[in-house]
Image: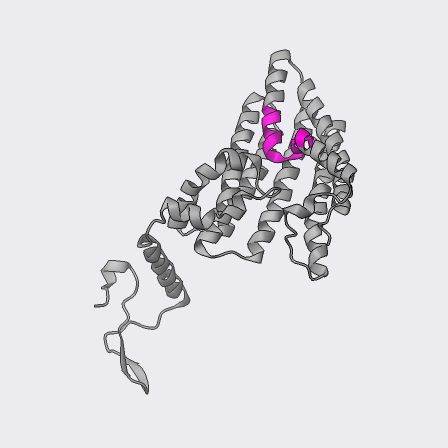
Amino acid sequence: MPAGPGTTGIPSITWHARNSQGAHRSRSACPPLTAADTNLFCTMQSRQKRSSMPWPSLSEVKSQGQPRWVVERVNDEHLFGKLYMRKISPYATRIFARLGWSPNAVTLGFIVCGVAAGVVVSFGGLATAFIAAVLVQLALLFDCSDGELARLTRRTSVGGVYLDRIGHYFCEAAMLVGLGLRAQGHWTSSGSYVTLGLAAALLAMLVKAETDNVVVARAEKGLPAAAGDASLQPRGARMASLRRAASLLKVHRIIQQIELSVLVVLAAIADAIRGGLLATRVLLIACLVVAALMVVAHLVAIMASRRLG
């Protein structure tokens, strides 16, 4: 039986199907729905579907959202993700699925938290360093959950991959620019440390572009995007030894937002104890040096590997 006007808040329309020749409206029917009424009906129908949607179990989230190939990735899976965030993220993914969020909405949450961390860290002080670190952890949680939700709901898309990659550019650049403003001591459009922060952000983006352009180059040659972990190994024995040494040191990680947020907290503690901004400024210079070295070293490593076919 159709719901009355007082039950759903949607105008009551009664349609009677006569036969295959057509249909007629009953005498008691309301006037045709306007565009606003149609939008209201679709919105309430969507809400009713979400309210009746069963909660996915944690085992479903883990089996469908976290397949083995995801957690065992060498380069794409973050260290902190393997250590603890992949154990926490299924709970968040379960909630996002229940709320009816799209994977792209979760990705936007990751970008907002990551960029906000860079803004917060720029203001200086010990409290802002801790707040920025918390925001970065939230960004990591969203970053883990967006892919899990896409695989769980079978809503993977090229647009989602693109948005996720662009988000990493924004977040890591924001953190390095924010560090430059923090090292300067105040917000300004000029200053030596602001310039260093901008330069570090640009170089870090070049490193990411070098990685992403491997996929572009392979696609233009008709090769699959993923070359496999074995292709990361350099062809020569000497280059392979250098790559292993660099992997053990993991110096390159200080220009990545998650590790950098932890280092910013440590630098802020040191500055609070001794006064001044020496530790923060040393950290910024270290990020610039590492980013500059990585632009060259990463390019050489890619050209010496088997990733380009």
Horizontal side of 70 relative to 291 (left or right) equals left
- Quick one: 97 or 108, which is closer to the camera? 97
Among the 4 quarters of the image, the one containing residue 173: top right
Q: Say if 265 sits above or below 83 in the image.
A: above
Q: Residue at x 70, y 38 (%)?
A: 204
Q: Quadrant of the C terminus?
A: bottom right
Which range of residues does the magenta coloring cover? Answer: 248-265
Residue 84 % position (x, y): 49, 34
The residue at the far left in this view is: 1
Residue 106 % position (x, y): 49, 47
Q: Quadrant of the N terminus?
A: bottom left
Display colour scheme: one colour
Q: Main secondary structure of the magenta part?
A: helix
Horizontal side of 53 relative to 280 (left or right) equals left
Q: Is residue 102 visible?
A: no
Q: Is residue 215 visible?
A: yes
Q: Say if 140 sits above or below 185 in the image.
A: below
Horizontal side of 136 relative to 309 (left or right) equals left
260 falls in the magenta region: yes
